[in-house]
Amino acid sequence: MKKFIIIIAAILLGFSSCKDTDLMSKSPFYDSYDAWVFFKKGCGNSYFYVAAMPLEGEEIFEKTLIVVDKGRVIERAFYRRGKDSIDAEGKRYPTFEEEWREDASNLGKYLNEGAEVRTLDEIYEIAEKEWLPQRIKTEFFFVAGNQGMISLCGYVERNCTQNCHRGVRIEQIGKLDELNKEDKDDKKKDEEKEDKE
C-alpha cells in the first residue's frame, strides 16, 4: 500500500511539473498581458499604437497609427515610403511616399493597406490563439519591448523565402493624451516655421 501511494504521488508530481514547464514557456506572453492590463487601466482604455512593417523582398517600409478611445478604434493613419535615392546634389529623398488617414466614419476604407483595424485587446487574443500556438517546422517569437507590452509577436515557416512573417510588430504604445500633446507640438513647430519664412 505504501508503494502504491508513493507511485501515485510521483505521477502527480510529474503532471504538475509538466504544467509548470508549459506555463514557464508562456510566461513572457502572460507577463506582457499583465503589463497591458495595467497600462489599459491607467489610461482608461484610450491609447495609440504604431504598427510597423518592412516588406520582405522590397525596400519599402510602412507604418500604421491606430488610435483607440475607450476601447474603440476611432482613427487609422498610414504612411509608406520607398527606399531612399540620392539626387545630383547628394540630397537623399524617398523614391515614393504614400499616406492616408481614416476616421471613425470611414475606418477600413483602405482594406488591403496598413495594419488591420484592431485594438490591443484583439491583438493579444490573436497572438495567444493564432500566432503563438506550436506548429511543426515553424519558428516562433515574442518580444515585449514597449514598457513590458507586446512589440514583436508571430511565427515564420522555416522553408519560406518571401513575405514569411505572420504576426505583428508594434513600434510604440502610448496614452492618448501623449499623442494629442505630440500633435500640438508638431502644429506649434509648423507655425513657428511658417512665421520664420
Image: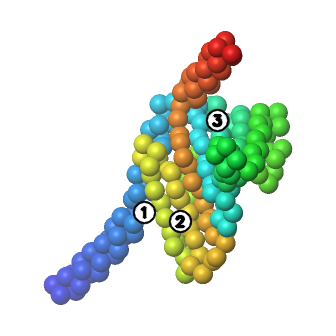
Q: Which amino acid type is shown beneath numbered disc 3? A: Val
Badge nearest the viewer, 3 or 1:
3
Could you say which disc has been placed on residue 112 in the image? none
Of the residues shown, which amino acid type is indicated by label 1?
Lys
Residue situated in front as seen by the camera: 187 or 19: 187
Is residue 53 positioned above or below 159 on the image? Answer: above
Cα distance between the residues tagged 2 and 3? 25 Å
Query: Marks 1 and 2: CB-CB under 8 Å?
Result: yes
Q: Residue furthest front?
A: 88
How many residues crowd mark 2 within 10 Å: few (<14), some (14–19), many (20+)? some
- Quadrant in the picture for the N terminus: bottom left
What residue is at 40 percent from the left and 57 percent from the top?
28
Pointer 3 or 1: first along the chain: 1
Query: Residue at coordinates 47% horizontally, 37% vertically from top-left?
Result: 39
Residue topped by disc 2? 132
Of the two numbered discs 1 and 2 on the same chain, state the one appearing first in sequence: 1
Identify residue for label 1.
26
Measuring from the top left, give residue 14's x and y in whole percent. 30, 78
Q: Position of residue 81 (x, y in %)?
A: 70, 48
What quarter of the picture does the C terminus occupy? Answer: top right
Q: Position of residue 119 (x, y in %)?
A: 63, 44
Q: Is residue 114 left or right of residue 17?
A: right
Q: Compute the Cα span from label 3 to label 1.
A: 27 Å
